[in-house]
């Protein structure tokens, strides 16, 4: 039975309650950052301002009954931008508002609902928000069949959800190998996605507009690469608080192909160039340069990452989301653009790149970063939901042994601090540093 208009409106009103609460959370953070004149802090403030603006846009579309979609960064968001389609990340709350005071309550509520605690907390929470009516129902949805089983389970559950059963969903089918056949196939999937979006919204894709977006997006990736190269400097000019996560958010979610995003990157490069020239590091005494090979621990990042710097002089020089093996997309014609987008979003997007395909990506990325950034140790946090990566721990450890670089696998939940507490993680890391003669 189809959901009637009145019921859908009630669902939208409830879904927007939490959405507006999250917007106010980011408003609060923006106001806190505004009080600090430090130019790096002001760059971070701009990211939170952009985040609030995106929340406002979705709220406006929902209240005015205009089309908006639920989607993902690794499904060519350049297309969304070119079609002028507002979108929000289906896993938005676990990643963006992970430090919000209500997150652990949501984790417990998801468990009380019967959602298994053995699958990724981000996927579990995302399904809980939909089941509990805490996400605004989009006009249509771009689902995800990769990089992990948990993502596939999430979308199998969503498509069968009573509340969202009338929301059309399309999932791009990812090929396994990185070769021309795979690129051609995924380019075809992105074309099918465009057809789907055109069918279920009032928007049409203009190829010339797509070219404009990609040209601007290429500028962002070029500047990101320039910034990533600057982080090779000794001492490292930036730490965990600036870099991978924010660059990723600006280029692949909040400002895809937008001039404001490009200008943000220019400011970041300018600030970092000046710090490198002045030989100014993020901390006064850099003793350990580490590669954090995953997402940051969102749920307790503010008490753990600063501790590494203050207690051990350990600087996050590079992380999975800051590693930038991106190539510019060829904008000569429609075919080259879709093939370029296929390669960027399937083989180069963080986490999707490593977890979707062959295990060699884990080994080759570690080898590249360790050599390029003069890394002293590799930390694999081992998020409980990243079972794909956990299956490759032996490979990662072996490549680190070959490189003569210490490697540690912690075992934690990036969102739920109770799985392995911050204090337990500090103890493991401290003993590891001491045993390896670091710091």
Image: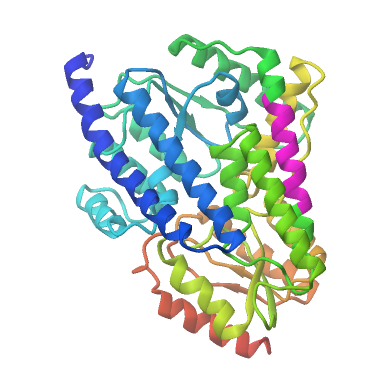
Residue 14: give x, y in percent of width and height.
21, 34
Q: Is residue 150 above or below residue 175?
A: below
Q: Can see residue 89?
A: no
Residue at position x 38%, y 59% from top? 99
* Range drawn in magenta: 213-226
Secondary structure, magenta segment, majority class: helix
Q: Is residue 10 above or below residue 309?
A: above
Asked whether residue 342 is drawn in magenta, I would say no
Q: Is residue 313 above or below residue 38?
A: below
Q: Can see residue 88?
A: yes
Residue at position x 62%, y 49% from top? 247
Return the residue nearer the eye: 177 or 98: 98
Quarter holding residue 252:
top right
Asked whether residue 220 is drawn in magenta, I would say yes
Q: Is residue 139 above or below residue 236?
A: above
Return the residue nearer the eye: 374 or 180: 374
Residue at position x 57%, y 16% from top? 194
Quarter holding residue 216:
top right
Residue 383: give x, y in percent of width and height.
48, 61
Report the side of 121 relative to 77 (left or right): left
Residue 163: give x, y in percent of width and height.
24, 27
Report the side of 364 relative to 416 (left or right): right
Quarter of the picture containing the C terminus is bottom right
Residue 322: give x, y in percent of width and height.
66, 54
Protein image colouring: rainbow
Report the side of 400 relative to 34 (left or right): right
Quarter of the picture containing the N terminus is top left
Return the residue nearer the eye: 280 or 183: 280
């Amino acid at each position: 039975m189809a959901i009637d208009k009145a019921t859908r409106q009630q669902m939208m009103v409830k879904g927007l309650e939490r959405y507006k609460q999250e917007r106010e959370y980011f408003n609060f953070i923006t106001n806190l950052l505004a009080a600090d004149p430090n130019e790096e802090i002001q760059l971070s403030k701009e990211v939170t301002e952009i985040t609030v603006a995106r929340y406002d846009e979705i709220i406006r579309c929902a209240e005015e009954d205009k089309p908006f979609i639920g989607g993902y960064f690794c499904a060519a968001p350049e297309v969304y931008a070119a079609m002028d389609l507002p979108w929000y990340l289906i896993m938005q709350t676990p990643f963006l508002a992970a430090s919000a005071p209500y997150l652990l309550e949501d984790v417990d509520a998801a468990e009380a609902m019967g959602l298994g605690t053995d699958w990724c907390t981000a996927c579990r929470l995302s399904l809980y928000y939909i089941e509990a009516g805490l996400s605004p129902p989009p006009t249509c949805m771009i689902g995800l069949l990769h990089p992990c089983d948990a993502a596939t389970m999430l979308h199998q559950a969503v498509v069968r959800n009573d509340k969202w059963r009338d929301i059309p969903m399309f999932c791009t089918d990812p090929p396994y190998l990185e070769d021309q056949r795979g690129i051609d196939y995924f380019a075809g999937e992105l074309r099918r996605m465009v057809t789907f979006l055109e069918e279920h919204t009032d928007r049409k894709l203009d190829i010339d507009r797509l070219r404009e977006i990609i040209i601007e997006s290429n500028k962002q990736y070029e500047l990101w690469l320039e910034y990533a190269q600057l982080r090779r400097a000794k001492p490292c000019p930036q730490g965990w608080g600036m870099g991978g996560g924010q660059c990723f958010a600006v280029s692949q979610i909040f400002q895809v192909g937008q001039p404001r995003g490009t200008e943000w990157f220019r400011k970041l490069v300018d600030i970092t160039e000046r710090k490198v020239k002045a030989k100014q590091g993020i901390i006064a005494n850099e003793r350990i340069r580490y590669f954090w090979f995953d997402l940051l621990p969102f749920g307790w990042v503010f008490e753990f990452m600063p501790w590494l710097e203050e207690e051990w002089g350990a600087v996050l020089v590079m992380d999975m989301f800051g590693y930038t093996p991106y190539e510019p997309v060829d904008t000569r014609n429609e075919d080259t653009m879709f093939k370029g987008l296929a390669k960027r979003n399937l083989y180069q997007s963080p986490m999707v790149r490593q977890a979707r395909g062959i295990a060699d990506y884990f080994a080759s990325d570690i080898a590249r970063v360790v050599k390029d950034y003069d890394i002293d140790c590799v930390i694999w946090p081992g998020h409980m939901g990243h079972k794909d990566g956990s299956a490759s721990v032996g490979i990662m450890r072996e490549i680190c042994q070959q490189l003569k670089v210490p490697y540690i696998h912690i075992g934690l939940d990036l969102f739920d601090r109770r799985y392995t507490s911050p204090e337990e993680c500090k103890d493991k890391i401290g003993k590891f540093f001491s045993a390896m003669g670091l710091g």
